């Protein structure tokens, strides 16, 4: 992969996205196994481009799934604490019969039959057992493994499972086992109140609970499906680590098992926690090779690594906020934004 000092098509696309009211802040990073090779900012908190830098925090939303929950699960696998093939009931004896035999890999790959279940009221750490029972109580939408249905609830349960394995809260596990080894000094759940945060939601912050995901907010800002805030400096470190197979976190064999497509017969490729990009991935815009892995966030964020072409990509934005203001479909707008950005990047790299 050959990188350039400037990428005029991608930069023009991002500036036009902001000018047209598609977002207020965007940030882009591209790199290879040696680290970041290109970055670009447009807009910023309050709309002033000069106020954004490498430490400006974004609501990562579902990118949390590959920042926290998936790699912690793989580390636990390597330590012999859990296996992707283990049934859910081994770790949740309270699981009803329709879920007890579901292998954990199906939760990681969104084919478990679990839907998205939002708590009717706040559930703090002192109500953890009640929160688990709530997620397990709902009937499955389909028999496990037969269909694909994106499920935040599966990752909420996986977050609870990790807390049980290590007897520690999820935010502490992330800080000690992922952020510290990778040098991600600013990435965290529940960030301190600061002006250098890009607002990603119409919902007002509740103190340090700022994530726009309602499940996460009901769990006081820490959950396995969403809640992490990160910046371009840290996400470039993470993207580089992902491209290299997370050598500071796990053995190569463990990572390769995690990065394999688990849903070849279903509508979207899914590895153990990751989107598996191939012809089924509509947002790729022709940029990614088959086998690239990563994840997107509802706010307008993404992080992908493409081992075949040897690059990682991080794009951050608050597209969902601006589409919500216009009362448009946020998911569709974010998907169109990413596809357009990927096509522009591909054109720049091929020039």
Image (cartoon, grey):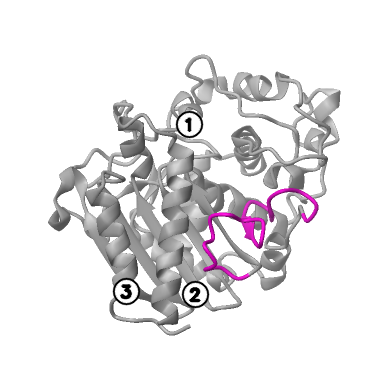
Secondary structure under badge 1?
helix
Badge 3 element: loop
* Image quadrant assignment for residue 153: top right
C-alpha span from label 3 to label 2: 15 Å
- Residue range in magenta is 264-289
Residue hosting label 1: 216
Q: Residues within 10 Å of mark 2 (few under 14, many from 20)?
A: many
Q: Which residue is mark 2?
A: 311
Q: Main secondary structure of the magenta part?
A: loop
Q: Are marks 1 and 3 in contact (CB under 8 Å)?
A: no
Where's residue 343, x and y in %? 45, 65
Residue for point 86% across, 35% down: 101
| Residue bearing mark 3 | 7
Camera-near label (2 vs 1) is 2
Gap in angstroms between the C-alphas marked 1 and 3: 36 Å
Residue 277 counted in the magenta span:
yes
Q: Look at the numbered disc 2 and give the secondary structure of its residue.
A: strand
């Amino acid at each position: 992969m050959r990188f350039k000092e400037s990428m005029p098509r991608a930069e023009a696309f991002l500036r036009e996205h902001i000018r047209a009211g598609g977002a207020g802040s965007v940030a882009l990073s591209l790199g290879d196994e040696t680290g970041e090779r290109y970055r670009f900012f447009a807009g910023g908190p309050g709309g002033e481009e000069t106020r954004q830098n490498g430490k400006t925090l974004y609501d990562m939303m579902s990118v949390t799934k590959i920042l926290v929950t998936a790699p912690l699960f793989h580390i636990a696998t390597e330590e012999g604490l859990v296996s992707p093939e283990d049934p859910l009931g081994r770790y949740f004896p309270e699981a009803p019969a329709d879920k007890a035999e579901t292998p954990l890999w199906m939760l990681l790959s969104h084919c478990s039959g679990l839907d998205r279940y939002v708590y009717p009221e706040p559930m703090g750490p002192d109500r953890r057992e009640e929160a688990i029972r709530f997620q397990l109580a709902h009937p499955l939408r389909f028999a496990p493994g037969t269909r694909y249905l994106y499920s935040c609830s599966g990752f909420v349960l996986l977050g609870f499972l990790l807390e049980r394995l290590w007897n520690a809260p999820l935010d502490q596990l992330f800080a000690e086992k992922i952020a510290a080894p990778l040098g991600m000094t600013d990435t965290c759940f529940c960030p301190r109140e600061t002006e250098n945060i890009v607002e990603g939601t119409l919902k007002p912050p509740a103190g340090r609970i700022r994530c726009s995901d309602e499940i996460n907010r009901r769990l006081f800002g820490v959950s396995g499906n969403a809640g992490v805030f990160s910046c371009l400096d840290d996400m470039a470190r993470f993207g580089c680590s992902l491209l290299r197979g997370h050598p500071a976190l796990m053995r190569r064999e463990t990572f390769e098992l995690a990065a394999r497509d688990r849903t070849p017969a279903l509508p979207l490729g899914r590895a153990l926690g990751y989107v598996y990009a191939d012809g089924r991935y509509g947002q790729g815009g022709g940029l990614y090779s088959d086998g690239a892995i990563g994840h997107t966030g509802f706010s307008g964020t993404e992080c992908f690594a493409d081992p075949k072409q040897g690059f990682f990509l991080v794009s951050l934005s608050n597209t969902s906020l601006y589409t919500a203001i216009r009362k448009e479909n946020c998911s569709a707008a974010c998907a169109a934004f990413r596809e357009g950005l990927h096509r522009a990047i591909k054109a720049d790299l091929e020039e």
